[in-house]
């Protein structure tokens, strides 16, 4: 369990979260495992067989605190939040912009540019760190191919074509992903392509769980500025899909989720014993594996980076809320462009 940076993560099987006056108690078999004043908690994430009592859910709803339930494999189950307080005029402007190609195209261009730039930086950093000449060459070649598409994005004015460019470069990026591991000959680091629902190997399991944590943070960031997380620009609208949250997280995937996975594996902080193979071929993190991953995720969010637009250091935890505000500003005002996050690794 961690309650770092106002998010309380609980993943102990059989744990019950209850409200005791103004304190959140985490108990199991009538034993108190953890307690934290409610005033210090911004959101609660329960992972696996974790139960919330009704009084706690009601208080969180009334006070605007988010409660999220995820499976042990990192799949979203439900999200509880109180009454919407977002600006209805902003949401109307968001809906109008999402269906207007003239307004939506620059937003999609910016999101794809941010993702491609940060993906390229990730590959170049790994190429510098690698001791294998073959891996260095493959990573740099992929980075150069991504850079070539990045430079021509402003010439592509069709949203479907932009989605195609994003998809092609995602495949290009993941085709060399395994070369970012220091011991890529180990069967444990086998990674051929992205496999989801369910992940079929430890590396895909690692990425899927990190992406689930990042999606939850992106949802909160969108709602914090009054945007509707369901109505996005890059991701196609589908019932139940948080398209805008997925849009916002694209720029942070390489620098946050992917980099954490690479670092944990290369430093041997996570290994084969942190995973379990389920019937049917799915791979899942063990409770200890999730603990290592959540701790690394929260520590990484404390790191500071220079925001290219603000020109000052900010914690990584603040990047999603900042980008959400920049997107809201671009939606509200004509002739104001959304500025993507470019992070130099």
Image (cartoon, helix red, strand yellow):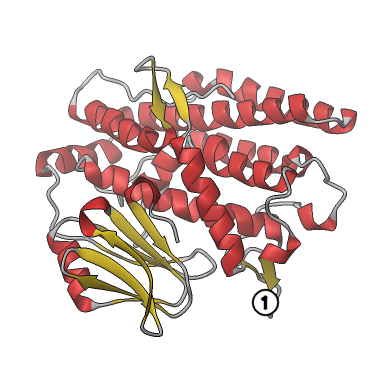
**Does residue 159 appear anywhere in the picture?**
yes
**Does residue 160 appear anywhere in the picture?**
no
Residue 4 in the image: x percent, y percent?
39, 49
Near-viewer residue (44 or 106): 44
In the rendered image, the quadrant that contains the N terminus is bottom left
Instruction: Give the left or right position of residue 125, taking residue 336 as reference.
Output: right
Q: Residue at x 57, y 23 (%)?
A: 150
Q: Residue at x 29, y 31 (%)?
A: 327
Give above or below for 210 relative to 168. below
Near-viewer residue (155 or 118): 118
Give above or below for 260 relative to 283. above
Q: Residue at x 71, y 61 (%)?
A: 201
Instruction: Give the left or right position of residue 10, taking residue 132 as reference.
Output: left
Residue 309 in the image: x percent, y percent?
37, 17
Give above or below for 151 relative to 181. above
Q: Residues within 10 Å of mark 1 (few under 14, many from 20)?
A: few
Near-viewer residue (268 or 195): 268
Find numbered disc 1 in the image and state the secondary structure of the residue it sits on.
loop
Near-viewer residue (188 or 248): 188
Residue 120 in the image: x percent, y percent?
63, 27
Instruction: Give the left or right position of residue 67, taking residue 188 as reference.
Output: left
Residue 147 in the image: x percent, y percent?
63, 22
Instruction: Give the left or right position of residue 48, taking residue 279 as reference.
Output: left
- From the image, tell me which residue sits under label 1: 278
Q: Residue at x 23, y 27 (%)?
A: 329
């Amino acid at each position: 369990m961690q309650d770092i940076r106002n998010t309380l993560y609980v993943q102990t099987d059989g744990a019950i979260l209850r409200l005791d006056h103004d304190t959140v108690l985490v108990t199991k078999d009538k034993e108190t495992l953890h307690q934290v004043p409610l005033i210090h908690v911004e959101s609660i994430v329960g992972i696996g067989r974790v139960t919330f009592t009704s009084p706690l859910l009601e208080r969180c709803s009334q006070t605007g605190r988010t409660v999220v339930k995820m499976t042990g494999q990192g799949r979203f189950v439900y999200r509880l939040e109180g009454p919407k307080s977002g600006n209805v005029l902003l949401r109307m402007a968001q809906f109008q912009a999402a269906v207007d190609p003239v307004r939506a195209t620059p937003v999609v261009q910016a999101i794809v540019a941010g993702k491609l730039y940060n993906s390229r930086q990730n590959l170049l950093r790994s190429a510098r760190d690698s001791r294998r000449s073959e891996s260095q060459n493959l990573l740099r070649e992929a980075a150069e191919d991504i850079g070539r598409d990045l430079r021509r994005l402003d010439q592509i004015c069709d949203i479907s074509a932009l989605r195609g460019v994003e998809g092609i470069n995602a495949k290009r990026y993941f085709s060399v992903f395994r070369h970012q591991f220091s011991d890529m000959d180990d069967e444990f680091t086998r990674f051929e392509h992205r496999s989801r629902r369910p992940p079929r190997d430890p590396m895909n399991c690692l990425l899927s769980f990190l992406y689930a944590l990042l999606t939850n943070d992106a949802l909160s960031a969108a709602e914090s500025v009054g945007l509707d997380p369901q109505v996005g620009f890059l991701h196609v609208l589908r019932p139940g899909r948080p398209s805008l949250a997925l849009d916002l997280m694209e720029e942070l995937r390489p620098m946050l989720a992917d980099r954490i996975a690479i670092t944990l594996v290369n430093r041997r902080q996570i290994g084969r014993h942190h995973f379990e193979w389920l019937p049917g071929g799915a791979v899942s993190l063990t409770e200890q594996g999730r603990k290592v991953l959540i701790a690394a995720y929260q520590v990484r969010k404390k790191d500071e980076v220079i925001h290219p637009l603000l020109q000052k250091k900010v914690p990584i935890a603040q990047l999603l809320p900042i980008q959400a505000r920049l997107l809201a500003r671009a939606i509200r005002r004509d002739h104001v462009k959304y500025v993507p996050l470019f992070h130099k690794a």
